[in-house]
Image (cartoon, rainbow, N blue to C red):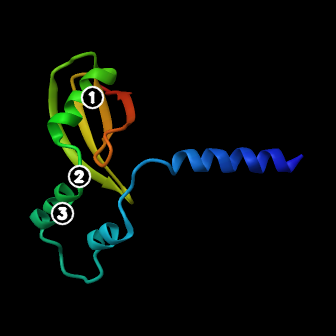
Amino acid sequence: MSKPIILLLAAIISLQAEQAQLSDLEYSSLLRYDFRPNRPVGKYEKLRSYAKVSPSKAQEIARKSCSGGEEIDYTRLARERRLLFYRIFTKSYIVKVNALDGALIECKRRKL
């Protein structure tokens, strides 16, 4: 009885792990091991250097996928652990597009 549940959980975990992520070396270069504050400009320069999809291409993907051609307010490059993505804000949506392979991660309604 527990065997199908374990197989189902393994399948769900493997589906989530298939998104393109930062490599070990890239991820470790973003971590901070000392207590000095990072220079913010340097951090974002590193993030931009790892991104393989341009912001304009990410905006195009967001327009086509779920925003219905709405005008884009602004785009921000962000990172959550090993996931590097563009967070794109329109008037009524927040769209996340993977910066490494251009896949759509999330599209949700913006609370106004």
Q: Amino acid at mark 1?
A: Ala
Instruction: Identify the residue at horizontal 35%, vertical 60% (top origin).
Output: 22
Label 1: state its secondary structure.
helix
Give the foreground label among 3 and 2. Answer: 2
The amino acid on which the numbered mark 3 sits, given as a three-letter code, is Lys
23 displayed left or right of 54: right
Q: Give the mark nearest the N terminus, 1 or 2.
A: 2
Amino acid carrying label 2: it is Ala
In this figure, which residue is indicated by the disc labeled 1?
62
Q: Quadrant of residue 57?
A: top left
* Location of mark 3 (residue): 46
Residue 42 badge? none
Q: Earlier in the sequence, mark 3 or mark 2?
A: 3
- Nearest the camera: 96 or 57? 57
Label 1, residues with CA under 10 Å away: few <14, some 14-19, many ≥20 = many
Spatial CA distance of label 1 from label 2 is: 16 Å
User: Residue 35: image x %, image y %?
Assistant: 24, 82
Q: Which residue is mark 2?
A: 51
Could you tell me residue 47's position as x and y percent? 21, 58
